[in-house]
Amino acid sequence: MKNIIQKCKEIYIKNKIIIVVLAAIITLVLPVLVPKSYFMGIMCRILMYATLAGSLNVINGYSGQMCIGQAGFFCIGAYCEAILATRFGINFWIIIPLAGLVTAIVGLGISLPTLKMKGIYLSIVTLGFSEIVRLTALNWESVTGGPMGIKGIPTPNLFGFEISNSKTYYFIFLAIAILFIFVTKRVVKSRIGRAWLAIREDQLAAKSLGVEVPKYKAFNFMYGAFWAGVVGAVYAPYVRFIDSTFFTLDEGFNILSMVIIGGQGTLVGPVCGSVIVNLLTEVLRPIGEWRMVAYAILIIVMMWWRPQGLVGASDSILAGDKGNGKKLEKSKQKGGGAHGVSVRS
């Protein structure tokens, strides 16, 4: 199996331009090739979760922090859109960045008191945060509607054209996914991204190199939270009704499983994870809740057989992280840790 992955990587490197162009063409004409709303709904979920998993990967994969609270940020973004649209009539296109900004501020609020935490301790805190957000949505009836949720979320429109079905939302989720990958790739290759990678490799060594660790860790959380909030803001009018049951702990672990299966510290990994998990969800739908057991088994197998995921750090060329990956490999060979990674704050 490892040989197959290596072969795929070699084929991709040799035919990168052709593969990218073909993928772009297929992605754009997919609504015509697959007109049924059921299949378009699956594609919307794949794109939505690709961005959600990618936003979690920014926190877990690039800076080495351990977050399981992405469902909480997703929930905040969705409720921001639902409340602002139904009660204040604010335009959908204005709400999207607002929801992302609100969620980023919440992310900052979570990161500041937990800057010295890492590993299992940070994961427990973020897990608790996600559940607090869900319970707040469940019980704050005057704002969130409580158990009844928020109904009749208005459908957005663009130049008078109503966005009301899976085909139109497909292009919105696609645009967000592409924008996320483009921006994140630029950030990862910048001074900020190098700082994140240095912190991931060795926090103490990064600090000795002059990296302002607290600042970059806080921004990392804000960045990951922002994109989860943006996705939540698009998800709310897509389903037109939200309540707290949409954002349970299962949702958080579902997003985490996509990152683990696809591969952390890469851009392509979460996309692959989203495709695999969402297709498995449809295939295993007849067994109901037992599919969570199947996910758990799959994660255990992946952690044992290929802990870096299908497209892990060692395959970063495939994910577009060629430069940073090589720098880190060289730094490890010279003496380990973050030494050799040139970062200035």
Image (cartoon, rainbow, N blue to C red):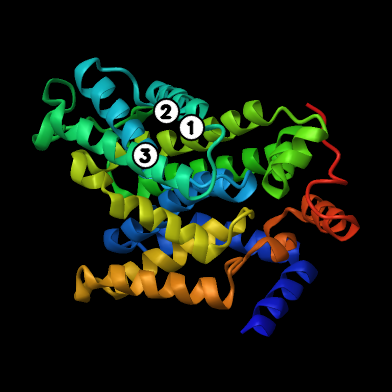
Nearer the N terminus, badge 1 or badge 3?
3
Q: In this view, does 222 lie above or below 287?
A: above
Spot occupied by residue 7 in the image (x, y as percentages of width and height): 71, 80
Residue topped by disc 2: 103
Mark 3 nearby-residue class (10 Å; few <14, some 14–19, many ≥20): many
Q: Looking at this rendering, what residue extends furthest in the top direction?
A: 88
Evaluate whether residue 58 shows in this view. Answer: yes
Q: Residue at x 76, y 74 (%)?
A: 10
Residue sitting nearer the eye, 226 or 216: 216
Find numbered disc 2 in the image and state the secondary structure of the residue it sits on: helix
Q: Which numbered disc covers residue 226?
A: 1
Mark 2 neighbour density, 10 Å: few (under 14) some (14–19) many (20 or more): many
Residue 20 in picture, x, y percent from top left: 67, 60
The tally of labels here is 3
Q: How far apart are marks 1 and 2 (CA)?
A: 6 Å
Whether the residues at callouts 3 and 2 have beta carbons within 8 Å, the answer is no
Q: Calculate the distance from the C-alpha at mark 3 to the C-alpha at mark 2.
A: 8 Å
Q: Is mark 1 on a helix, strand or loop?
A: helix
| Distance CA(mark 1)–CA(mark 3) | 9 Å
In primary-sequence order, the first of circles 3 and 2 is 3
Q: Is residue 237 visible?
A: no
Amino acid type, mark 3: Phe
Q: Quadrant of the C terminus?
A: top right
The image shows residue 260, relative to residue 132, as above or below, that is below
What residue is drawn where x is 46% and y is 64%?
A: 275
Q: What residue type is labelled 1?
A: Phe
> Residue 41 at what x, y percent from top left?
32, 56
In the displayed structure, would residue 224 be above or below residue 31? Answer: above
Residue indicated by mark 3: 74
Would residue 321 be found to the left or right of residue 103 on screen? right
Q: Do tag 1 and tag 2 residues touch (Cβ < 8 Å)?
A: yes
Foreground of the two, 75 or 278:
75
